[in-house]
Image (cartoon, grey):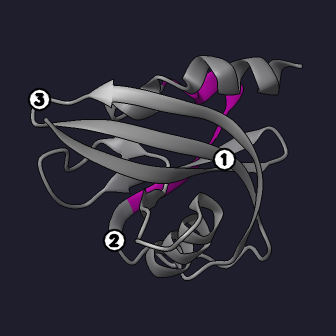
């Protein structure tokens, strides 16, 4: 089975988490944490900074690793490294996604998450609840 390794930004603003809605592909309209594939020679943190700049025209500070998710989709295995992140400015532009929103703990499960992304909601919920 094909293996894909990606990074995801868990962007936090107070008690809210940033989510984006896919605008393309098999999972169009599903929600995810922004990020993408790690390019050869990049660290996960460097990949995340690049991906957020490309997807959102934004800059971030990458914090600690929240969790690494291993997930089997029908045609590939996904390894997703999820990092806590902070925006360095509030300006965002959606270059690849059709929508975005900030979700508080109460509304974290109110959108249709991609299966791998859904897998980290319990840990995010635990952190936000502290």
Which of the two labelled residues, at mark 3 and mark 1, occupies the earlier sequence position? 3
Label placed on residue 16: none
Residue identified by numbered label 1: 83
Residue identified by numbered label 2: 96
Q: Can residue 45 be seen here?
A: yes
- Closest to the observer, 46 or 121: 46
Q: Is residue 42 positioned above or below 3 on the image?
A: below
Spatial separation of the CA atoms under disc 2 and disc 3: 23 Å
The residue located at (74%, 73%) in the rendering is 90
Query: What kind of element bears circle 3?
Result: loop
**Stretch in magenta:** 99-109
**What x and y, as percent, mark residue 125?**
69, 21
Spatial separation of the CA atoms under disc 3 and disc 1: 25 Å
Please state if 58 lies on the left or on the right of 40 as rendered: right
Q: Are marks 1 and 2 in contact (CB under 8 Å)?
A: no
Q: Can residue 111 be seen here?
A: no
Query: What kind of element bears circle 1?
Result: strand
Residue identified by numbered label 3: 74
Spatial separation of the CA atoms under disc 1 and disc 2: 20 Å
Q: Is residue 23 positioned above or below 27 on the image?
A: below
The residue located at (79%, 27%) in the rendering is 128
């Amino acid at each position: 089975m094909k293996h894909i390794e990606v990074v995801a930004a868990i962007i936090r603003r107070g008690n809210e988490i940033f989510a984006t809605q896919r605008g393309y592909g098999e999972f169009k309209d599903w929600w995810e944490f922004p990020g993408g594939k790690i390019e050869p020679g990049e660290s996960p943190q460097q990949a995340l900074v690049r991906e957020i700049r490309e997807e959102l025209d934004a800059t971030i500070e990458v914090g600690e690793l929240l969790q690494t998710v291993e997930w089997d989709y029908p045609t590939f295995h996904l390894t997703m490294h999820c990092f806590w992140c902070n925006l360095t400015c509030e300006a965002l532009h959606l270059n690849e996604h059709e929508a975005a929103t900030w979700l508080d703990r109460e509304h974290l499960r109110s959108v249709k998450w991609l299966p791998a992304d859904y897998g980290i909601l319990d840990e995010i919920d635990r952190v936000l609840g502290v």
